[in-house]
Amino acid sequence: MYIVAVNADICTGCEECSNNCPVTVFDMVDGKATVARGDDCEGCQTCTSVCPSGAVTLTEM
């Protein structure tokens, strides 16, 4: 199980995490990425790799 989080204070709204997540964990709300389907996360770390601001974090539980 993985916990995905987005720091909205540093999210630029570039949509890289949303566009590249293979299981569509993210939705964009008010110009920021939000974790909409965190239970679907497979831990591939694509989101953390493509986020230019480092706003997305992934923790294995």
Image: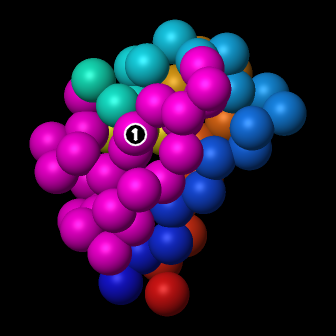
* Viewer-closest of 39 and 46: 39
Q: Mark 1: give few (<14), some (14-19) or many (20+) Cα within 10 Å.
A: some
Q: Name above or below for residue 44 compared with residue 3.
A: above
Depicted 60 relative to depicted 19: above or below: below
Residue 42, image x, y percentages = 23, 65
Left or right, residue 7 beside residue 14: right
As drawn, the residue found furthest toward the front would be 30
Residue at the (43%, 19%) spot, across then down: 15
Q: Position of residue 45 (x, y in %)?
A: 36, 48
Q: Which residue is the extreme one toward the left?
A: 22
Residue corresponding to mark 1:
27
At horizontal 60% and vertical 20% (from top left) the residue drawn is: 31
Secondary structure, mark 1, is strand
Q: Which residues are magenta?
A: 20-45
**Which residue: 32% across, 75% down?**
39
Residue 49 visible, this angle: no
Left/right of residue 28 with respect to residue 8 in the rendered view: left
Q: Residue at x 79, y 28 (%)?
A: 10
9 within the magenta span? no
* Residue 24 is inside the magenta segment: yes
Q: Where does residue 20 sit, x and y in percent of width and height?
A: 25, 28
Give residue 48's position: percent from left, percent from top: 48, 39
